[in-house]
Amino acid sequence: MALKTAARISTISYDIRGPLAALADELEAEGRDIIRLHLGDPAEHGVAAPAAVLDAVRRNLDASCGYAHSQGIPQARDAVTAYYRDRGIDDIDPDDVTLGNGVSELVQVALHALLDPGDQVLLPAPGYPLWAAAVTLAGGTPVHYRCDENADWIPDLADLSARTGPRTVALVVNSPHNPTGAVWPAPVLHAMVEHARAHGLTLLSDEIYAHILYDAPHTVLAGLAPDLACLTFGGLSKTHRVPGFRVGWMLLTGPRRHTAEYARALHLIASLRLCPNVPAQHAIVPALRDIEQTARELTGPGGVLRERHRSAWRALRGLPDVGCVRPRGAFYLFPRLPPGRRDGPFARELLRTQGVLVAPGSGLHHPKGDHIRLTSLAEPARFAEAVTRIGLHLASPNGP
Ligand code: PLP
């Protein structure tokens, strides 16, 4: 008898690691040269992790064999607390911090503690697909609000209002934004907080790209909403280039009389996975101590991510009929394909004929199906080669 599969699985997806990535593996195994631009993994593109981060894990390895506290080791939670205090988030202590095996795990823990069947969560479209899948797995219903390409991919506040109803319980904010790289300006974030306040929504702020900015300021959302329950997510996968370590954190803020019961649920669910990977947690202390310097090295003048991002954007803009809003943060480009091209078939044929792997926008909840996401992390000559191949594909008369 066939092994039973939960019905809700058919309603979730994570296309970034789906069939196209499998096809790329097959083509590579056949000896084809594949340019992989579908993931946001700095390590894959040779942007090495800070030495202090690696040293901390090596030094603490022998002492990390046992289980740790379910919320994470105290020195790392202290470091996260100090990091947010330095950014103006007062009235927090290490008990408000929960560490996890990446933001990916923590999002699922947070949503399982929050949602009942039928509860709705507002999510940006386009958006990072983890969130919608995690909402569904936790029994909730994802409801997407539109980000407007004609306004630098900023959320459309009228659409956000229109999609808010009696079952809406939470609002997800993601700035800098994956996949568009938009950095949502403070007035927009203020308006979103005001919306959450007016409708009694919990704020869920995915700030994993908080330090990957190109001349745009980052706003810690929790600082705008001390009176609201807010979960802020961050980690070491992007700025510190160790996504393989699986290390992230989440901070719960807001009036304790409102958050205490939820915090107990959160800690209960966190305790079911016993504790996050212990060796990697040691990386948090030097990572956050040196964060400003690390960010400057990456995105300041001459910084490796700044240079790669700029040259990638310029190279892409050279393609005829391909439009791309200039991203102010993160390390993605989200171009619009020429009229008549559909993202899924386009990405598949691009991979098959030219050996370039990108993520179709519809897998990132872009309803129009005419965008693709590429990472700008690739070494510039490699990215330029990818653009040449994309150009050849676009020039082929019968391509989808
Ligand atoms: N949130 C966003 C917006 C992301 O882009 C990613 C990874 O690409 C994650 C969360 C997952 O991060 P982690 O490696 O900490 O699980």
Image (spheres, rainbow, N blue to C red):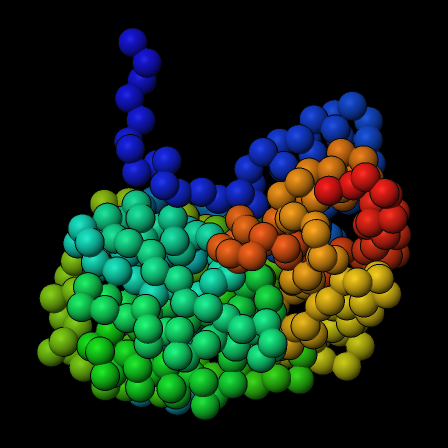
- Horizontally, residue 296 falls left or right of residue 388, namely left
79 in relation to 351, above or below: below
Q: On the image, which quarter does residue 16 sit in? A: top right
- The reply to whether residue 384 is visible in this rendering is yes
- The residue located at (40%, 73%) in the rendering is 159
Q: Quadrant of the C terminus?
A: top right
Question: Total label count?
Answer: 0
Work out which residue is located at the far front of the displayed protein and give it.
Answer: 340
The spot of residue 216 in percent (x, y) is 61, 84
The spot of residue 266 in percent (x, y) is 22, 59
- Horizontally, residue 243 falls left or right of residue 399, namely left
- The reply to whether residue 100 is visible in this rendering is no
The spot of residue 288 in percent (x, y) is 50, 72
- Horizontally, residue 131 falls left or right of residue 265, namely right
Residues 77 and 363: in front is 363
- The residue located at (38%, 86%) in the rendering is 191
12 in relation to 6, above or below: below
Residues 326 and 164: in front is 164
- The residue located at (31%, 48%) in the rendering is 136
Q: On the image, which quarter does residue 2 sit in? A: top left
Q: Quadrant of the N terminus?
A: top left
115 in relation to 10, above or below: below
Work out which residue is located at the far top of the displayed protein and give it.
Answer: 1
